[in-house]
Amino acid sequence: MKKGGAWRPQLMKDIMVMSKSRARPPLKRPTWIIALVCIVCVFLVSAYFYPPQSSTTCYLFSSPNCAGMFGRTPPSPVRELTDDETASAVVVKEILKTPPLQSKNPKIAFMFLTPGTLPFEELWENFFQGHEDKFSVYVHASKQQPIHVSRYFVDRDIHSEQMPLIINNQVVWGKFSMVEAEKRLLANALLDPDNQHFVLLSDSCVPLHSFDYVYNYLMYTNVSFIDCFVDPGPHGTGRYSEHMMPEVEKSDFRKGSQWFTMKRQHAIVMMADSLYYTKFKLHCRPNMEGRNCYSDEHYLPTFFRMKDPGGLANWSVTFVDWSEGKWHPRAFRTQDVTYDLLRNITSIADSTHVTSDEKKTLLSTPCMWNGMKRPCFLFARKFYPETLGKLMHLFSNYTKV
Ligand SMILES: *[C@@H]1O[C@H](CO)[C@@H](O)[C@H](O)[C@H]1NC(C)=O
Ligand SMILES: *[C@@H]1O[C@H](CO)[C@@H](O)[C@H](O)[C@H]1NC(C)=O
Ligand SMILES: *[C@@H]1O[C@H](CO)[C@@H](O)[C@H](O)[C@H]1NC(C)=O
Ligand SMILES: *[C@@H]1O[C@H](CO)[C@@H](O)[C@H](O)[C@H]1NC(C)=O
């Protein structure tokens, strides 16, 4: 706090008035005046560089404003940042103002988070075919070694042997290790400098559009599609713990689906963050003080909303159907998968959220892509493995537009 800042200009004026009024009549004594001005200057300079710790300086200068100024409490109630917060703010700001390196061959990294074998590899192969230089695939399997049927997925597994405890290494749905797995996938995908946009997908996700459509949608925008909204209910802000203070206030807490896409700059920001990451790791976990907090639904929306709100689309490009109002989203079976269903999903152009409080408020915002209203979704979940044949059959039809 700069306590001394405000009184100095007033003091300066007082002294100038004083020296002027004295300077006029005894013009014969310039040396005396110069000496006085010099002494005053020395005082002012030393007062500036060594701000007064007590009111001694006040007595010396005996300015009329002085006592009043010192008696006052600091005017602004703004919280002082901790050292870690200051360091974090500096690093994040620096990354955000540095434009990412332009790659000659920009690619999209498709990162699959799965318990084991991916049921839709064949469908993804159809999707990827013919675009070999524009994408890379990464697979993080948490329970079993996946068996790959598509050449695009062979040898693309992320290994995590560096973790000494293999038991703790397993991704348990909803636990913090989910965020750790996301970070591990991102870190591996960042190793390839051509990867400019990063997409997180699950084993039950399917593509809704052609590769070119998806590529252009993600590449030619400056935002990350991270889902983010305020849910004042028990499944939103109700999961917040005061232990996240002072860095994360209750009003900062956000919710959103974990299935993000992220631009390279944001992926690097996430790599650089340990302060907020640790806060969530420690204080947003299932079964904490009688609450179940799921970091994968809160860490990224909260963190990026605080650090770069303008860089977020605020919706996820992965469709999921919560309309049944159950604990889990609707999962589609073979009989559900029709041309109509896929048409319907791909035509949705408003992003909706329902709060978990009694009001069950429906929040709806148009999906704006570079200022234009566009369909929201590029991928959809959840599909049972049995739907593969039907989806393969329909794929070229529903991805035409
Ligand atoms: C994204 O940002 C870059 C550099 O800031 C700018 O040149 C470009 O026009 C922006 N693109 C869009 C789609 O906003
Ligand atoms: C997302 O929300 C933030 C505020 O929460 C806002 O600043 C930003 O403009 C929004 N993004 C879009 C694309 O509207
Ligand atoms: C598609 O949307 C229309 C209009 O909202 C609805 O009547 C129809 O039942 C939907 N079809 C499927 C398969 O969801
Ligand atoms: C694909 O579209 C064409 C023309 O729109 C239609 O005749 C054909 O039956 C469709 N195929 C499937 C599998 O829906």
Image (cartoon, rainbow, N blue to C red):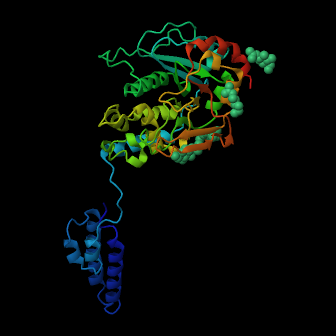
Left or right, 104 with respect to 140, comes to right
Q: Nearer the viewer, residue 277 or 397?
A: 397
Which image quadrant: the N terminus?
A: bottom left
Percent x, y for residue 235?
43, 38
Q: Tell me which residue sits at (26%, 66%) in the image.
A: 46
Percent x, y for residue 35?
26, 78
Q: Nearer the viewer, residue 11 or 34?
A: 11
The image quadrant that residue 238 belongs to is top left
Q: Tell me which residue sits at (66%, 43%) in the image.
A: 371
Find ligand 3 in the image and state its quadrant.
Answer: top right
Left or right, 30 with respect to 377, comes to left
Left or right, 240 with respect to 125, comes to left
Percent x, y for residue 353?
55, 39
Which image quadrant: the C terminus?
A: top right
Percent x, y for residue 164?
29, 16
The image quadrant that residue 143 belongs to is top left
Q: Tell me which residue sits at (36%, 57%) in the image.
A: 78
Where 309 sits versus 282, above or below? below
Task: Tally the marks.
Answer: 0
Q: Nearer the viewer, residue 378 or 277?
A: 378
